[in-house]
Image (cartoon, coloured by chain):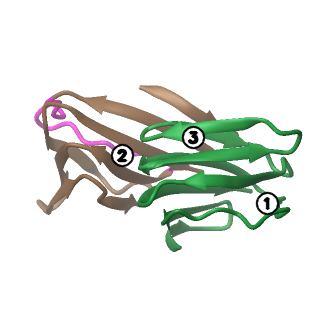
Chain colours: A brown, B green
Amino acid sequence: MEASFENAAVKIERIVSQSHKSPPGFWYDQPQDEWVIVLRGHAVLEFEGGELIEMKQGDHLAIARHVKHRVSQTGPETIWLAVHIE
Amino acid sequence: MEASFENAAVKIERIVSQSHKSPPGFWYDQPQDEWVIVLRGHAVLEFEGGELIEMKQGDHLAIARHVKHRVSQTGPETIWLAVHIE
């Protein structure tokens, strides 16, 4: 991960996922709101309760703080931009 | 422009520029910090003092508040993501 911008309120990261998945049973439970966009490739996010969201290039999504989610699947060369918002 | 996320601290916009340029003599002078990335296409930004910055797909740039700048040139189908940060 490469932080592209960071101040007290906001952190912007560029993330490269090479067929990465979250480990079984792992959930992100983050104290900040997050906004993500897929810059290249594709991915599937899983939310607690079982909802799956497929994301392809250009798709974006807001994930409120403490909404548990994991990366179910990513393509071989997937690039994300993630904005973490206090 | 399409606001993709907005709260009190942060606004994220997706901007499509079709060979758009700022009018001659026009300068953006914004009260927020800005972070931009070119999602598709290319552009040239001009800064007060004459510095020109070429941006192609994937390039990103932080522009501090009140740093005067204008869009000198964009490609026929350029898509930006702009994050405005209070």
Which residue appears at 61% of the width and 68% of the height?
B7
Q: Quadrant of residue B9?
A: bottom right
Q: Which residue is mark 3?
A: A11
Mark 3 or 2 closer to N-term?
A: 3
Callout 2 amino acid: Asp
Q: Which residue is mark 1?
A: B28
Few, some or many C-alpha atoms within 10 Å of disc 2 (few <14, some 14-19, many ≥20)? few
Question: Whole-Å distance between the Cαs marked 3 and 2?
Answer: 17 Å
Instruction: Give how far across and how far down residue B25 sits, in percent.
Output: 85, 62
Subunit ID for the residue under disc 2: A
Callout 1 amino acid: Tyr
Q: Which residue is mark 2?
A: A29
Callout 3 amino acid: Lys
Q: Foreground residue, B36 or A2?
A: B36
Which residue appears at 15% of the width and 34% of the height?
A21
Instruction: Give how far across and how far down residue B2 sits, in percent.
Output: 49, 74
User: Does mark 1 fall on the same chain as mark 3?
Assistant: no
The magenta segment is: A19-32
Which is the main secondary structure of the residues drawn in magenta? loop
Few, some or many C-alpha atoms within 10 Å of disc 3 (few <14, some 14-19, many ≥20)? some
Q: Name the side, left or right, on which B58 lies relative to A76.
A: right
Question: Whole-Å distance between the Cαs marked 3 and 1?
Answer: 23 Å
Instruction: Give how far across and how far down residue A11 sits, in percent.
Output: 57, 40
Q: Name the side, left or right, on which A85 lies relative to B31.
A: left
Residue B60 on the magenta span: no
Question: Whole-Å distance between the Cαs marked 1 and 2?
Answer: 38 Å
Mark 1: which secondary structure? Answer: loop
Say above or below: B37 vs B14: above
Mark 3: which secondary structure? Answer: strand
Q: Nearer the viewer, mark 1 or mark 2?
A: 1
Marks 3 and 1 close (CB-CB < 8 Å): no
